[in-house]
Every structure is written in C-alpha cells, then in structure tokens.
Image (cartoon, rainbow, N blue to C red):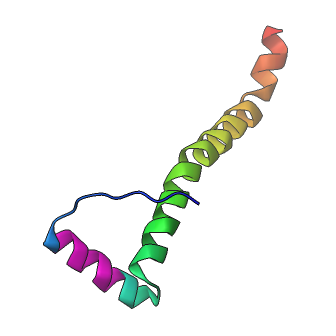
Amino acid sequence: MAAITINITEQQLQKLQELAEKLGMSTEELLSASVEDLLNYPQNEFNQSASYVLRKNAELYKRLA
C-alpha cells in the first residue's frame, strides 16, 4: 500500500477529525473512504447515465438504424 502526504490547514484538520468522530471512524479511514468514493463515483455515474439514455432512446435508435 502506498502513502501520500498533503498539507491542510488546522481548521480543515479539525473539521475532518470532528466528522470522523461523528461517523465513528478514524480520520485516516474517513479520508481513505472518501478517496475510494471519488475514484469510483464518476465511472459509476457515467455508466448509469449511459444506460439510462440507451434504454430511453432504444426505439429511436432502432428507427435510425
């Protein structure tokens, strides 16, 4: 597993720690889950949108073919 270091303000760190505490997890777990969501969300959103458009316009595509 790789590690990464970023610089954040004390205020940002405090907010992250408070949010992690409310969620019952460590700050590191919160950040790791957030990165995972960020990396997966755009692809999932695109796939869902593309599937919706294809289903919605299936009859039109058949007529145009």
- The spot of residue 43 in percent (x, y) is 61, 43
Residue at 49%, 53% (x, y): give it.
38
Q: Is residue 22 above or below residue 47?
A: below
Question: 5 or 41: nearer the eye?
Answer: 5
Q: Is residue 10 above or below residue 38?
A: below
45 left or right of 19 in image:
right
- The spot of residue 8 in percent (x, y) is 21, 62
37 left or right of 4 in image:
right
Question: Exactly how many numbered labels are in the figure?
Answer: 0
31 left or right of 43 in image:
left
Question: 63 or 35: nearer the eye?
Answer: 35
Residue 2 highlighted magenta (yes or no): no
6 left or right of 56 in image:
left
In terms of secondary structure, what is the magenta stretch mainly? Answer: helix
Q: Quadrant of the C terminus?
A: top right
Magenta segment boundaries in residue numbering? 11-19
Q: Is residue 33 above or below residue 27?
A: above
- The spot of residue 1 in percent (x, y) is 59, 60
Residue at 49%, 76% (x, y): give it.
29
Residue at 30%, 75% (x, y): give it.
16
- The spot of residue 61 in percent (x, y) is 78, 18
Residue at 16%, 66% (x, y): give it.
9
Q: Quadrant of residue 36?
A: bottom right
